[in-house]
Image (cartoon, coloured by chain):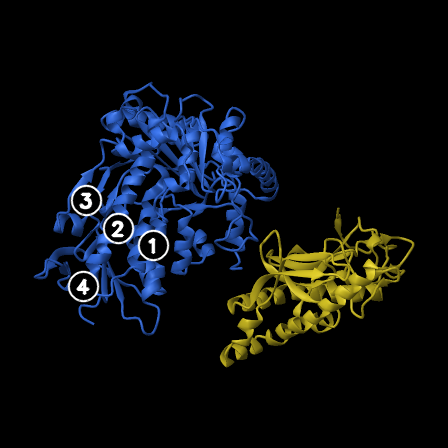
Amino acid sequence: MTNYVLLNNVDHKDLKIINTRSAEYGDNVMFAMTFPFEFRNIQSCYPIFFQKNADTGQLYPVALFGFQEKENLFLNDDGWDASYVPLMIQRNPFLIGFQEVKGEQGAANKQRVVSLDMDSPRVNESEGESVFLEHGGRSEYLEKTSDILEAIDNGYNNNKDFVNTLLEYELIESFTMEVTLNDGTKNQLLGFYTINEETLQNLDGEALGKLNSNGCLQPLFMIIASHSRIKTLIEKKNRQAL
Amino acid sequence: MVNAVKQIVIVGGGTAGWLTAGVIAAEHCQQPESTIKVTLIESPDINPIGVGEGTWPSMRSTLQKIGISETDFFRECEASFKQGSCFSGWVNGAKDDRYYHPFTPPHGFEDTNLAAYWQAAREQISFAAAVCPQTELCNRGLAPKNISTPEYAFNVNYGYHLDAGKFALYLRKHCVEKLGVLHLLDTVVAVNSSDSGDIKSVSVSTGFDVAGDLFIDCSGFAALLIGQHFGVEFCSKKEFLFNDTALAVQVPYQNESDAIASHTLSSAQKAGWIWDIGLPTRRGVGYVYSSTHSSDEGAEVELRQYLSETSLGVDSDSISLRKLKINPGHRQKLWHKNCVAVGMAAGFLEPLEASALALVEQSAKMISEQLPANREVMDVVSKRFNEKFLYHWQRIIDFLKLHYVLTQRQDTAYWRDNGQSASIPDSLQELLSLWRYQVPWHLDAPLIDELFPAASFQYILYGMGFETQNHPERSTSATKSMRNANSLFQENAQRTLNLLGSLPTNRELINKIKQYGFQKI
């Protein structure tokens, strides 16, 4: 379970965060949300697909780490074995939230606030990175995390625009991937969505121009390039089966 | 081409008119090479009846074909999900007397007839619950899908409840703005014939004539073209279906968050039955009854009684009633010369099983798919159209009457008279005697596009407690399928449990559609 509270330098002055990557700390996830601005880094390590938010039905891009629930093929005894760890993983156990603040004329404004999950096993007072400096100032680690949270917050809106544009051009389709391992066992990947490459190839110049000016064209091809990483996942899975 | 059909003129702008316009225009008017024009003349003086608030699952594919987004449809038309009908008090009038006719056919219906195997277990579980998850879903007011299910797709089959007035307006907007239907807000004052007896044009009140090659009469009970102009005979069916009057009301919810029923509730009364349809912001309720068996005052007392029992916290006594007259029956021909009638102009029986809009959709579909290229072949198409739809009308009469004839109720003359054999069509009597010994199955339905498949007959028969003395153990194929049947029953039970755990309520999902919308994929 999660227990999010607003971060402050009084209650949390001695707080430390363990940044080790392992199943013990909840890194055994099959996928994580990703954002167009980090696609370049993501595609060098992970395949990118789309998922639907079960609560809203809205599509969002994800980086895939495994073929079944709780499987993260990038985790090993030494941590997370990849050159780039997605922002949605790096931000743990912090979350960006909003608080209504009364402005000068009494108008309610929404302000970004940082919260953290007090139930996360990463949160403690003895081990890991300090959140605040000795006299209550923000640590370099917290500054970095705040930047990540801000990027994620912008990323949510980027994702909405990106997905809506792709849907408008009917560029997203549902798909089922069947992966056969060396030992003959089969894994089926259900409930994910991908780029309809045939539709993409048949787009005319005007459509491509629009996608480009919207900033959607490059991430689109990043996604397609990322699919060569499926092979990486299969290799990892095969090695694990040995 | 000689006498090519190019101008299609629809007279009447209710749901029937706009649905027909939409289906035809979406198919025939969207290409640069298209030569067909659809014009719809709608009288500003006539209000649509606007109580047709239930649809079949076929409406999903109709809307999709017309190019309507399901999200917009929900947002604009006060729509909610309908998974079937629940009949309360039809068997014996006891407190627990209710059964379902769900939209999903029995599990494995393609090749296994579970009704045959259910007979042995009939005391333990209702037929509908044994073969379909929707009974349980409806009992809990659950939706037939999730917000992540794509638009028009489903976890279990569904149609809609909707606000008929808003639906007609929404269809009009879509037809005019997206499909290029020409809309004339004017009243038809004269029908002008050509030498051959065809309709050449109709004159409108602003003083000009609208010429056409094919005229579609969607003018409702007035039946301006098929009835008033051509005088095609009207065949009353009141000898079989007694209901000829309806009192309709709109009932607000007490709270914004009140549950929205996932089915049409049909409650049997002394001289007819009450429909109860849940929309997001109100219920639509009405008593349809036989004026031979009840006075209007008596019916109003019964309806108000029902409202006070079912609308806690709502001042139901102050709700005003609207009275509608029904003349149950249909035209002896639906397509005459260059004029075809769709909707109430073609006929109407009664609201039971909401067949009216389904017939409109079927009619529009056949007119569109078989649209005669010219006047010469129109008579071939019209002959086939008449054969098919007269058959449909007869089957609907049989199916509706089936709901009444199996009752054990003897408490009023209405129910006793419904059991009189003179009031039962011969075709239905034949089927009933057959079904004493064999369960309804695919071959009972001769047409490929049958309106009511054998599954529907099964749900009503066995919901009403009808007994079929069949012996699957004596037949080679049925014995072989026995094991399969048992696993189908188990699968249905398991699937029901899974769905109960994963589906939101109707209200929750409708709120989410308004907030987020469905995805196309």
Q: Secondary structure at mark 3?
A: loop
Do the CB atoms of the residues marked 1 and 4 lie less than 8 Å apart?
Answer: no
Q: Which chain is displayed in blue in the rendered image?
A: B
Q: Which chain is displayed in yellow in the rendered image?
A: A
Q: Is residue B334 visible?
A: yes
Q: Quadrant of residue B516?
A: bottom right
Q: Secondary structure at mark 2?
A: loop
Q: Secondary structure at mark 4?
A: helix
Q: Quadrant of residue A154?
A: bottom right
Q: Which mark is residue A178?
A: none
Q: Residues within 10 Å of mark 1 (few under 14, many from 20)?
A: some
Query: What is the distance, in whole Å, between disc 2 and disc 3 at their CAs?
Result: 13 Å
Query: What is the distance, in whole Å, between disc 1 and disc 3 at their CAs?
Result: 31 Å
Query: What is the distance, in whole Å, between disc 2 and disc 1 at their CAs?
Result: 18 Å
Which one is in front, B173 or A16? B173
Front position among marks 2 and 4? 4
Query: What is the distance, in whole Å, between disc 4 and disc 3 at their CAs?
Result: 23 Å
Q: Residues within 10 Å of mark 3 (few under 14, many from 20)?
A: some
Q: Which residue is mark 3?
A: B332
Q: Name above or below for residue A35 compared with residue A5.
A: below
- What chain letter is assigned to the residue under label 2? B
Front position among marks 2 and 3? 3
Q: Name above or below for residue B155 compared with residue B479.
A: below
Do the CB atoms of the residues marked 2 and 3 lie less than 8 Å apart?
Answer: no
The quadrant the C terminus of chain B occupies is bottom right
- Is A40 positioned to the left or the right of B405 in the image? right
Q: Given the current orientation, which residue lies at the most extreme top position?
A: B411
- What chain letter is assigned to the residue under label 4? B
Q: Which residue is mark 1?
A: B169
Q: Which residue is mark 4?
A: B376
Badge 1 and badge 3 both on one subunit: yes
Query: What is the distance, in whole Å, between disc 2 and disc 4 at their CAs?
Result: 22 Å
